[in-house]
Amino acid sequence: MRQNESETGAGCLLVVITFIIAYIATPLSFLQLIVFIPIIYGAVFLIYQLYCNLYFNSSKFKIIKDSIQEYTKNSNELNHHIQELKCSYVNVKSYDYGESHLHDYSNYNFKRKEWSKDIKSNRVYNCSATVCKNASNQPFKYLCKYFDIKISEETLSNFESVLNDFAAAEQGKKLLQRERDAIMNNIKSSIPPLIYSFSKNRLIKELGFEVIDLSDLYFPVYTFQYVSAGGNSSSKCDIKLNVENLEKLIYYLNDLVKFRNSVEGQRALMTASLRERIKTRDNYTCRQCKLSTNDEKNLLLEIDHVIPLSKGGITSEDNLQTLCWKCNRSKGAKILADSFAPLG
Ligand SMILES: [Zn+2]
């Protein structure tokens, strides 16, 4: 929306400059015009850049920057926390099958263009066309079978923990963006409109905000890949473990684990509805520092296992609590420090 506004603004400015040029340039010949127009645009651009540099180095801008220092620091910390949450997939076991090189010594001139697209990774399985097709029909079954994902309570817990972190990261991204927009809106009247409309990204950077990575490239993708012997035909089936698919995967694993153990405990599943239920139960308030979404509209609340999964805790309503991201982060750091502490 705001980007559209600034684009419209830039468009208007260009039209105005073009009219001015047209007015000045009417008596000029065509050749003179070709030289004249870029010079005008260049001059306007240079003057604007100079104006920006002067503004960002001015004491007036420094006062605004200092006044929101606390918010930028908080926002950057949350940004780091979200980046950490995105890395939680390392807990899920993956096998390293080693490295090798395939050499093609064929005497015939096959057009093996598909071979050159061959991807080698722990998360790519080269298979027959039938397996590839079947994997697209029953993704989770084939994912567990061909990528050695053990169907067990431990795997289920690991995936639940990843889902919990990914869901928090996705929500955190939205809240972080909303909070940053709110801060920018608050200071809008103190910033020259020209800078606010045309150099918004630079303004955000100069204020000290770090870049928020809004992409979802961090979701793990497992691929089944078929390439024909001649290398002329190929097919691919990608299984992306985003939040929605992870939730389906834990339902799938849960059914199989239950089937194997044939015992149903008090165990709940870390689904979106359970996470929402826990937050509602705790009145959207951090159980540790008592901060709530009433105090801070864009506060990121996370669901925490009171007894961590790594210490034998399970996903059940009694063992879950709402914590704000800061308290959850410091709790996680403490558990990590404890587990490395010398025994005795
Ligand atoms: Zn807290």
Image (cartoon, rainbow, N blue to C red):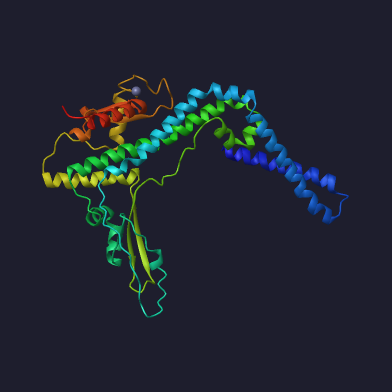
Q: Quadrant of residue 326?
A: top left
- Judged left or right of residue 42, residue 201 is left
> Can you say whether 299 is above or below 92 in the image?
above
129, 34: nearer the viewer: 34
Residue 208, x across and y down, in percent: 53, 31
Quadrant of ligand 1: it is top left
Query: Which residue is drawn at the image coordinates 34% and 39% (left, top)?
Result: 166
| The C terminus sits in image quarter | top left
Residue 131, x across and y down, in percent: 27, 63
138, 132: nearer the viewer: 132
> Can you say whether 90 is above or below 118 in the image?
above
On the question of residue 285 being in view, the answer is: no
Q: Quadrant of residue 156?
A: top left
Residue at the extreme bottom of the image, as rendered: 108
Residue 73, x across and y down, in percent: 47, 27
On the question of residue 253 being in view, the answer is: yes
Q: Quadrant of residue 299?
A: top left
| The N terminus sits in image quarter | top right
Query: Which residue is drawn at the image coordinates 30% and 40% (left, top)?
Result: 163
299, 208: nearer the viewer: 208
Query: Which residue is drawn at the image coordinates 57% and 37% (left, top)?
Result: 201
Query: Which residue is drawn at the image coordinates 37% and 60% (left, top)?
Result: 119
Number of marks present in the image shown: 0
